[in-house]
Amino acid sequence: MCPVLGHELDKKKGNVFYDVKISYFRNDLNGTLFEGQVDTRIIKGKKLFDHPVSMDIGKICARLCQDRIREKVRRHYFTQLFFSEYHGRHFSFEIQNVRAERRESRDLMQDLEDIRNGIQIVHASDMEKRDSENKRERRRQARESAVRRLEKKLLENGYESLEKFSVDRRHADKWLGEERIAELEQMRLEKEKERREQPVQLSLFDMEVL
C-alpha cells in the first residue's frame, strides 16, 4: 500500500528507460579533410533505477522525473561539457523517449532509420554486457597469471616453503588442489635430482691443479 498514491502498488516491476542523444566534436580528425566534423550518437535503453521498481512508480517517474534524468546525465558528462565550453568545441546531449517498461524494448526499424541518417546507435544493455564480459576476461587473465606465478614458486621452492595461513598457501590449496600440488612437487624433486646427477665440468684451472 502506497500512502502517497492511496492504493496498493502494482506488483509488476520494471524500470524507467530513456535514450541519450549526444552530439560531439571529433578531435581525432584535426589536420584531416574532415576537421571540424560533429558526430551524433544515441545511447538507447539507459535505466533510471539500479533495480526494478513497481510499474506504478515507474510510470509516475517517467512523467515527473525528467529533470532528475537530465541532471544525472549532466553529471555523467560533466568533463566533456566543461571542456567543450572551455575550448569552444561542440558537445551537447538531449534526453529522448523517456518511458516506463517492464523490460527494455527495441525498435529495429527506428534504429535502421537513425543509422541511415548517419547516427551511431548503441544500446546500453549491449554496452553493459560487453563491459561485464571484459571484466570477466580481465579477471580470468589475472587469475591465470597468479596461478602461473604460484606454480613457478612451488617448482622452485616446494609447497612446504609457503608459510602456514599465508595468502599463497591458501591460494595454492584453493586454485591448485592436492593433485596438482603433488604433481608440481614431483617435478621439483625430479629437477633437483637431475641437477645433482649432472657431471661436474672442470675448468682449465682445475685441470692444471689436478
Image (spheres, rainbow, N blue to C red):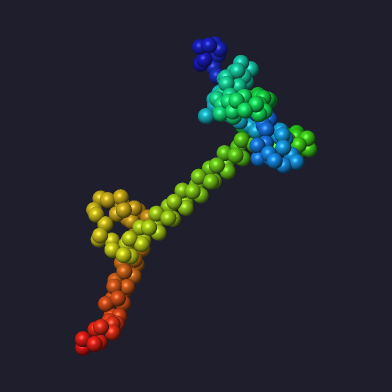
* Quarter occupied by residue 54: top right
Residue lying at 62% horizontally and 19% vertically, measured from the top left:
66
- Residue 150 placement (x, y as % from top left): 35, 58
Q: Is residue 127 left or right of residue 1?
A: right
Front position in the image: 170 or 146: 146
Residue lying at 53% horizontally and 46% vertically, measured from the top left:
134
- Residue 117 placement (x, y as % from top left): 78, 35
Q: Is residue 78 left or right of residue 36?
A: left
Q: Relative to 35, is 95 above or below?
A: above
Residue lying at 49% horizontally and 48% vertically, measured from the top left:
138
- Residue 82 placement (x, y as % from top left): 58, 25
Q: Is residue 126 left or right of residue 173?
A: right
Front position in the image: 162 or 31: 31
Using the rendered image of the protein, determine whether residue 121 is visible from the camera's viewpoint: no
Residue lying at 51% horizontally and 16% vertically, measured from the top left:
1
* Quarter occupied by residue 12: top right
Front position in the image: 167 or 53: 167
Q: How many marks?
A: 0
- Residue 93 placement (x, y as % from top left): 65, 26
Q: Relative to 92, is 167 above or below?
A: below
- Which quarter shows the C terminus? bottom left
Using the rendered image of the protein, determine whether residue 146 is visible from the camera's viewpoint: yes
Front position in the image: 106 or 164: 164
